[in-house]
Amino acid sequence: MINFTVGPVQSDPEIREIGREDVPYFRTPEFSALMKENEEWLLKLANAPADSRVVFLTGSGSAAMECAVMNLFGPQDKLIVINGGSFGARFAKICDIHKIPHDEIRPEFGCGVTEDDLAAFAGKGYTGLLVNAGETSTGVLYDVEMIGRFCREQGLVLVVDAVSSFIADEMQMEQWGVDLVFTGSQKALALPPGISLLMMGPRAIRRAMEHETESLYFDVKDYLKNGERGQTPFTPAVAILIQLHRRLEKIFAEGVEKERARVRDLAADFREKIKDLPLEVLTKCPSNAVTSLHPTGTRADGTPVKATEIFSVLKDEYGIWICPSGGDLADYMFRVGHIGYLTTEDNDRLIGAFRDLMRRGIL
């Protein structure tokens, strides 16, 4: 199988080989040193301000979402949630669960947020803003730099979900005024799922240290304290953290910009090659990580081509995974990822499969 989803994605052979090894004991000076290097490299990738820290959480990206919200905010706060898809809606649901007052900005499907959208919320007592830098369900990349300017002007704490966009798209924590950004191991880091990474700036750390978090496992104060010695308060996914170390080591050895350019070029190559196919790109401001597509063709009986059928046929007959959509969008759109261990030759294989589906009347 070749994997064009947006997570879990394909890992390179060296990373997979590390995953085959026995998991070592981790309460050792050697593992602590490895973790301190992981933290240093991640903060560099995020362009974090001085005195920032990383929380290594064993859990999915959704665990990081809830952890970030419940450690920084409470019922006394009033948040703005940018809800442009499934993961913006998840932020809103987390606020509901933790009884945190919030209002939503709902941009048009496939579109970003404008300065006018934000201006309507100025001077109204909000304390924080939650945004998915890349809304994975639609492929939209929001303008975090512009959102950060608004948050600085209004004194808001800015929390950014970069689960699918981290490394694939630029992240400038210090320059853009991002207080906390998080990602997951199974996206552009191209590791197995199981670790989420919260990069916390000084303001987020201070806020978390002063906040009473009603949780044993998700209280970041324990993670920050244990992180001072390169450890976590609970048993982490040790093997993935070792794989993370090797992945980060390779990124910095080869060049961070080279890695980002590789993803960007893969996305550009794919989008260029589908221009003559009956596929509509749905996102006006796409992330490099993913392309959202609507099949515009019709079958021989005159019915519209369904995205669900394209997904199933590619999986079952061509050995290719693309990313399906759920709910009302299931038949309307699918997504193609550009992260993980992929090449332009892999793009060619997918394009060839699309052309074959056209000949068969399925696209």
Image (cartoon, rainbow, N blue to C red):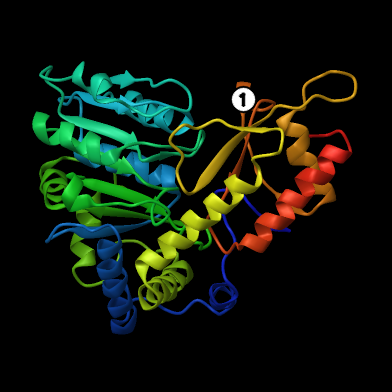
Question: Left or right: 154 with respect to 75?
Answer: left
Residue at which label 1 appears? 329
Query: Nearest the camera: 202 or 166?
Result: 166
Crowding at dot 1, Cα within 10 Å, few <14 / some 14-19 / many 20+, comes out as: some
- The disc labelled 1 sits on which kind of residue? Leu
Residue occupying the point 43% across, 65% down = 259
In depth, the one of 212 and 207 nearer the eye is: 207
Q: Residue at x 37, y 72 (%)?
A: 255
Say left or right for 102 vs 324.
left
Q: How far from the left and from the top, in percent, is residue 11?
A: 57, 66
Q: Left or right? Give the position of 154 relative to 280.
A: left
Residue 231 seen from this side: no
Residue 279, image x and y in percent? Answer: 67, 34
Rendered location of residue 12, percent (x, y): 57, 71
Residue 24 higher or lower than 216, as above or below: below
> Compared with residue 277, is residue 112 higher up or lower down, i.e. above or below?
above
- Horizontal and vertical percent for residue 54? 26, 59
Direction from residue 235 to residue 125 in the image, left or right: left
Quarter holding residue 328: top right
Residue situated in front as seen by the camera: 47 or 191:
47
Q: How many marks?
A: 1
Local SS, label 1: helix
Quadrant containing the N terminus is bottom right
The quadrant in which the C terminus is found is: top right
- Which residue is at the far bottom? 30
Q: Where 13 falls versus 174 (above or below)?
A: below
The reply to whether residue 180 is visible in this rendering is yes
Determine the residue positioned at 85% across, 25% down.
Answer: 299
